[in-house]
Image: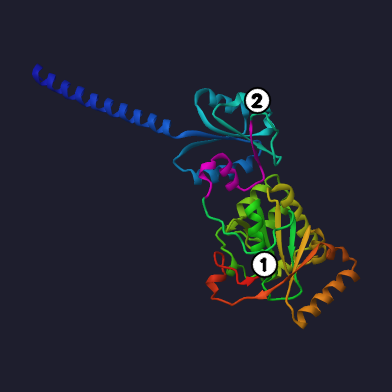
Amino acid sequence: MNQKYRKGITGIVFIRAALIAAKIQKMTEEKRKTEDIHGHFVLCDVQKEYSENLLKILMDRFQGKFQFHIFHDLEKLKLFSGTSEIEILLIAEEYGEEKIKSAGSGRIFIISEKRKGRENDGMNYIFRYQSAEKIIEEIFPSNKSCVKKQRPRIRDEPVGNGIIGIYSPVHRIGKTRLALRYGRQLAVRAPALYLNLEGCSGGNYYFSDACGYDMGDLLYYVRQDGASQGIRISIMTDQTQGLDYIFPMKNEVDFRAVKGEEWIALLETIKKKCIYDSIILDLGDSINGLYDILRKCDRIYTPYTEDGVSAAKIEQYEKNLDQAGYGDILNRTVKKKMKKGKLSDEKNGGINGADRISL
């Protein structure tokens, strides 16, 4: 091979090597730019199942906007923060305030078992047992949903918080629509949850089953008595006009098999583990332990109409309460006179439709 030919080959090889090096450099620069744009979002928690569930929700919501990392060991988190700049750190209070402060930089949010964090310590606290949507709103307040809330048409303002029961021995007078409207009004002020506790709720008429969960699933997870009950309940909720709800049980036989003490245990768990100030119970006659559940309510609304049958049923119901030793329920009961409005087609009565009962 002559010298001239060898020089030509060498030149081609050099050019190709230079092109490859330039391509690698360009890819490296693009990767660095991507890393600069997509900051590190780190979740560090002692509760493995809870944190994994929350991380999945965050990744689905902010896919492509952050690089997500999860740790359960604080020392591993410190090693990571020594080499990478953390933009957002969501960390459990169990690690201790001093260690948390040394764990990373950026915006730090402490996952707390308490509804409100300590005052004036300069830290951001997030209540653990609230919906993932609420957690996201607290971390990214500018991303808060801008859905306009319509003010429900109830003449008197809601009184108090706690468990609100809606029950009547009189049927087909708009009890569920009253419960939903009342719940939406409460939700304007503070987080509220609606639960339909009827054997045949007609859930598909009023609600979307987008999450795929119903009250049966909720009862199952509460029976497990795990640390992640709060986040599991949050995942099962959907929303209608600002009011959270869980789809009613689909099988009436399964519904009738639930014991009264199980319903009460469920309510206690929600009060303890979730952020809701109000729980609205839409109660039917087929539920076990009806009177005991009503006794747990801070207030009961009993809708009625002015006709002979309605008056007779209300009178019998009140006598039954007294005779069974539950007369104290009447002291917390408010009667609501219902006026049947003009019925419209089914589309207007569904999840996003107008109510058809005027008060």
Q: Residue at x 62, y 76 (%)?
A: 341
x and y, in percent, of residue 303 in the image:
73, 71
Of the numbered discs 1 and 2, the one sitting upstream in the chain is 2
Q: Which residue is mark 2?
A: 99
Mark number for residue 40? Answer: none
Q: Is residue 85 above or below residue 130?
A: above
The answer to whether residue 63 is seen in the rendering is yes
x and y, in percent, of residue 181 in the image:
64, 63
Q: Is residue 209 magenta?
A: no
Query: What amino acid is at disc 1?
Result: Leu
x and y, in percent, of residue 283 in the image:
73, 66
Query: What amino acid is at disc 2?
Result: Lys
Task: Give the quarter of the image for residue 48.
Answer: top right
For this orientation, the residue located farthest to the front is 155
Q: Is residue 345 above or below residue 115?
A: below
Q: Is residue 137 magenta?
A: yes
The answer to whether residue 266 is seen in the rendering is no
x and y, in percent, of residue 132 in the image:
59, 46
Quarter containing the C terminus: bottom right
- Element type at mark 1: helix
Q: Residue at x 70, y 68 (%)?
A: 198
Q: Which residue is mark 1?
A: 178
In front of the other: 259 or 105: 105
Segment colored magenta: 123-145
- Element type at mark 2: helix
Task: Give the quarter of the image for residue 214.
Answer: bottom right
- Image depth: mark 1 or mark 2 in front: 1
In front of the other: 92 or 336: 336
* Gap in angstroms between the C-alphas marked 1 and 2: 50 Å
